[in-house]
Image (cartoon, grey):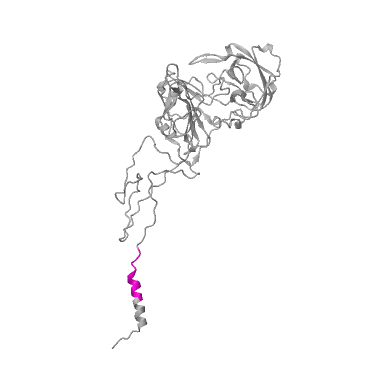
Amino acid sequence: MKLSIPIGGILLIALVLAACTSAPEPTRTPTDAPTPTATASPVGTPPRTLTPVASPNPTATPTPIPTPVPTAIPGPTASPRPPGTSVPSPVPTATPIPTPVPTAAPTLQLRDAIFGRPCSGAGPVPFTTSPLDPDLIDYIRPLGSISTSHITPTDHAYFHHRNPGIFPPQNDVRATGDGYIVSIGTMSGHLRPAPPGQPGNVEDYRVIISHSCTFLTIYIHMNGLAAEILEVTGEFGQGSRWVPSDSSPPIPVKAGQVIGKVGVGSFDFSVHDAEVTLSGYVVPSRYDGEPWKVHTIDPFEPFVEPLRTQLMEHSLRTTEPRGGRIDYDIDGRLIGNWFLEGTVDYRGSGPLVFPNYWYGHFAIVYDYIDPTQIRIGVGGLGDDGGMVFGVRGNSPDPADVTPTSGLIKYEITSSRYSFPGSEIRGDNGETRGTLLVQMLGDRRIELEVFLGQAPDQVQGFTSAARIYLR
């Protein structure tokens, strides 16, 4: 039997066969995977948590080849590799090596509650290292001293080391706990001439370490910075300052790590906890210019034992709190800090212009070493821009003086210390004059200092009297 196929049918069959045989099956393309970067960069956690975590490393991606796609073999996460390093196998492995000193800072997305600098974590951090080797400490002056340039009680302790005047500075200053350096500035004495007979200049730094988003330490008057810190910040001229930026992140430090040197004199050390607000400041907003002040805590408190006891044994204060106190305000009472009418805040801003911010300060508090003694600080008085006095007989107690007490006269005396241990007590010092004060309201006082005049020579206020407010 002869099969007859129309010509049109033959053409249709030819076209179908051509379509089936001329085009090969397309090759499958693997899904794009993140490319491992040269360095793994930990990133900050979402705002609801306070500890940044490292982002997971990308897993290895099989290389596409023209042959049938192989099944990926499960294996450990790929480790970061320097640029240009080839991957020897599709499943690289790595053994993590712990390093005692971090060399790279993560991206910290949170900001601390005091300075607004990058941070991680929250809450107090135990301190395992003294900022200065305890064997090198001569004595520690606790919080709360007042002087001609610190009219209100100081918010830092002074660490005095043995053999002051060493130049170049040789004593190591260390981080007390893990954290990040978030600010370095220079003090007014930075690059002043070295001590006589010594070449060079004296460096003078202020360093802030964030141990968590609520817990920070401040070091002032360090005479040098560690080389690895200067590699990040560069050299500092007068008035220079370094703070973290996108190109220069916070500098990680570990407890015990050397951050600088001290040798020329003492250095200041303070601890600030944003979860603590001092109750002895009637108007906390007065201190907005120095936001750390209202969060100052006993500098010995965070240290673990037996280190805490070692440090307290160096303190000149033998009564509790051994680290001192700075806040004495009682609303409606004379005791505490006062600010000249016309000034807005602690820094002395406002319509009045002063050579220094403390010119508008007045304080009547208890001595930082012997709290049975009354101390008075008056800014803008004397050749040094301020004067500090004791009180004959330590009476009346400023905590007992109220708006109903009327005119109060204090016989003011000389008050100074020769450290360590040998002091002139304010109540038996040389008479310097009379302080006349009256509370005009719970938060308003009038006062005047009569230098060289005994209390019985003072009858009342003159036109030189000043008004102070809380």
The structure residue drawn at horizontal position 32% and vertical position 51%, both measured from the top left corner, is 75
Residue most extreme to the bottom: 1
- Residue 204 lies, in percent from the top left, at 47, 25
Residue in front for this viewpoint, 276 or 457: 457
The structure residue drawn at horizontal position 39% and vertical position 53%, both measured from the top left corner, is 33
Q: In this view, does 50 lie above or below 272?
A: below
**Residue 154 placement: quadrant:** top right
Residue in front for this viewpoint, 370 or 237: 237
Q: Quarter of the image containing the C terminus?
A: top right
Res 361 visible: no
**Residue 229 placement: quadrant:** top left
Residue in front for this viewpoint, 371 or 455: 455
Q: Quarter of the image containing the N terminus?
A: bottom left
* Residue 24 among those drawn in magenta: yes
The structure residue drawn at horizontal position 32% and vertical position 86%, both measured from the top left corner, is 4
Q: Give the range drawn in magenta.
A: 15-26
